[in-house]
Amino acid sequence: MTKEEKYALAVMVIDHALKSGAQEVSVSIDENRSNEIEIRDKKIDKLLESNSLGLTVSLYVDRKYSSHSTNRMKKDELIRFIEEAVTGTRFLAEDQFRKLPEPELYYKGGGTDPGKLDKTLDTIDTRTKIDMATAVHDEAFGKDERIISVSAYYSDNIYNKVLVTSNGFKGDSEGGNVYLSAGVSMKGKTSRPSDSWSETSIFIDKLTKSGIGSKALQRTINKLDPVKIKSGKYPMVVENRVVMNLLSPVYNALSGYSIYQKESFLAGKIDKPVGSKLLTLADDPSIPSSPGSRLFDDEGLAATKRNIFEDGLLRNYYIDTYYGRKLNIKPTSGSASNVIMNLGTRDAAGLVSTLKKGIFVTGFNGGNCNGSTGDFSYGIEGYYVENGKIIHPVNEMNITGNMNQVFFNLVETGNDPRKGRSFMIPSLLFDNIDFSGI
């Protein structure tokens, strides 16, 4: 279906929904094409190609709201679908805050194309994709007699979307990505560790294709036969690959939903210190050809750059129009675009080299964070470090603390955010973290 056909279909749906009794309507039509290939121990374990086209209509009927999705695109089926959806919405409870965004908040056109689509992905044949995954697999397979299993994974995705509302918004977006990874499991004397490595990119010609299997293998070898260490307070370096495990509860606490439900430990803290002066994060949708770049968000709100944290102060929440009305806060956006952090001068190895006695965390194994209080407990794995040198792997340890305090313990940021990610967060060094071991 062409973009023009999607727009025409969306307008038809809106017109019929209004005639059927809705006061406001929003329609999005999403098309997605994807491929997945998995190679496990020299055999193709998965070969999947998927193509989908779906329509979602959001209805505002007599102060009542509902959202409905379908993949049936024939006009007569859609008309019946819309009429039944409008009728069903009338049975719901009223919600005075459910309205479309105010038109002045919408993206009005212009700006630079985010550049998130590699059209060459559609020209690559399946054999080539299998060969890419196989090459990753073969970097590790058979390279060590302790290996239990090796897997390699390839995926790509291309999407396009149009969004039309009854109060004046019309916009479209497109993008895609390609991904390669390897996973290795091994048998040691006292453990059976596993680890992985992955690379992703919007553009296949910029994707790192070599070294993935080798890195996954080496990371797994490094984790063989860990040793428990004594409980205590240690400085902690968190690797860039897993640092979002610490930031995810923070981002959950920034959402309008969490604040309204009183499940946010950051509620009421705008312009107040919530971390050390090194905590500076910006949300920037304008970075060319970056995964989170966009001209507008899922509601059609114009995308703008803004600071979330600045020198340790909380500056902005993620507020969509619905929770903006409920909280009486100006909407920003209900979702993140590209999140960038002020960088330091050292990578993870450089940060580790500064530790007299500490822990280099390279993985998280379960645990949880209380959204209301910020109390957390996470299982970790990684390495014990003395005098800047890795001594041995560790696991079966927990870190505990409170999110309201832990970022005050941030003492250095790395210079190594991972490529191809919308959250561009480097490795981080924290001081005085509680570890429980033996």
Image: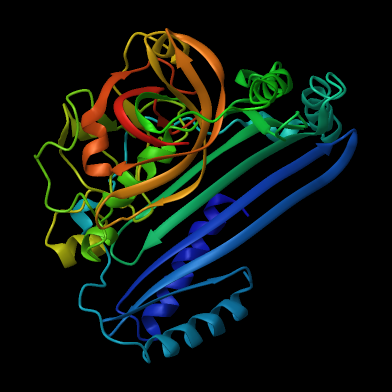
Q: Quadrant of the N terminus?
A: bottom right
Residue 246, placed above or below residue 13: above
- Residue 147 is situated, as x and y percent measured from the top left of the image, at 82, 28
Residue 331 shown left or right of residue 288 in the figure: left
Q: Residue at x 48, y 58 (%)?
A: 7
Residue 132, placed above or below residue 319: above
- Residue 174 is situated, as x and y percent measured from the top left of the image, at 51, 42
Q: Residue at x 35, y 25 (%)?
A: 234
- Residue 280 is situated, as x and y percent measured from the top left of the image, at 23, 27
Q: Residue at x 54, y 47 (%)?
A: 160
Residue 130, placed above or below residue 319: above
Residue 282 shown left or right of residue 315 in the figure: right
Q: Which of these two is toward me, 215 or 336?
A: 215
- Judge whether residue 364 can be spotted in this image: yes
Q: Which of these two is toward me, 197 or 108?
A: 197
- Residue 432 is situated, as x and y percent measured from the top left of the image, at 28, 27
Residue 335 shown left or right of residue 217 in the figure: left
Asked which quadrant contains residue 123, the reply is top right
Residue 114 shown left or right of residue 286 in the figure: right
Q: Which of these two is toward me, 366 or 32?
A: 366
Residue 357, placed above or below residue 60: above
Looking at the image, which residue sits at the far right? 43
Asked which quadrant contains residue 36, the reply is top right
Asked which quadrant contains residue 323, the reply is bottom left
- Judge whether residue 419 can be spotted in this image: no
